[in-house]
Image: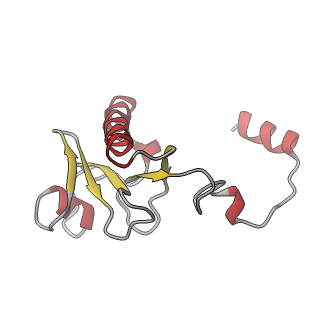
Amino acid sequence: MEESEDCILCRIARGEIKSYKVYEDDFALGILDVNPCAEGHCLVVPKKHVERFYDMDDNDLGRLFSAVKIVANKIKKAINPDFVCIFIRGGRVSHLHVAVFPSMKNDSLSGFPQSSFEKITVNLDEVAERIRNA
């Protein structure tokens, strides 16, 4: 997938919009999230436009997660959290981005996402079978 002219993350990757870079290589960019959930909350994005991680080829996905690991280690060294968490969704911005953020034991991120949602009852055998057979 090619760059998108109006995609904010493509524009950041091209240097058209200011960002707070913490990491960059020829494939990926690590930047501070401007709406952080914690000090040191970063986004790691591929420089080329892609919407979903499962749309990337395996080699590119490996390169992206190598960058995620580098940024996670930088957060661990700089912030010294108990955990460094990652989250991928991409709903608000249609450009794949991996959120990488520090977390401490018992902070508001502990137990996320399960602790943030109403508990539901599911037939685990049935759901496992459906996914296995998909």
**67 relative to 117 in the view: left or right:** left
Residue beneath the point at 44% across and 60% down: 90
Q: Residue at the spot x=43%, y=62% of the render?
A: 38
Q: Position of residue 54 (x, y in %)?
A: 47, 43
Query: Looking at the image, is 86 positioned above or below residue 70?
Result: below
Residue 127 falls left or right of residue 43: right
Query: Is 67 in front, or is 20?
Result: 20
Work out which residue is located at the far front of the displayed protein and give it.
Answer: 80
**Place of residue 25 in the rendered image (x, y in percent of width and height, measured from the top left):** 17, 39
Q: Does any portion of residue 32 appear in the rendered image?
A: yes
| Residue 64 picture location, percent across and down | 33, 38
Residue at 81%, 62% in the rendered image? 119
Q: Quadrant of residue 58?
A: top left
Q: Which quarter shows the C terminus?
A: top right
Please, which colouring scheme is shown?
secondary structure
**Image coords of residue 57 (percent x, y):** 37, 34
Of residues 116 and 105, the one nearer the viewer is 105
Query: In this orientation, does residue 133 appear?
Result: no
Total labels drawn = 0
Relative placement, left or right, of 120 versus 90 is right
Identify the image quadrant of residue 21.
bottom left
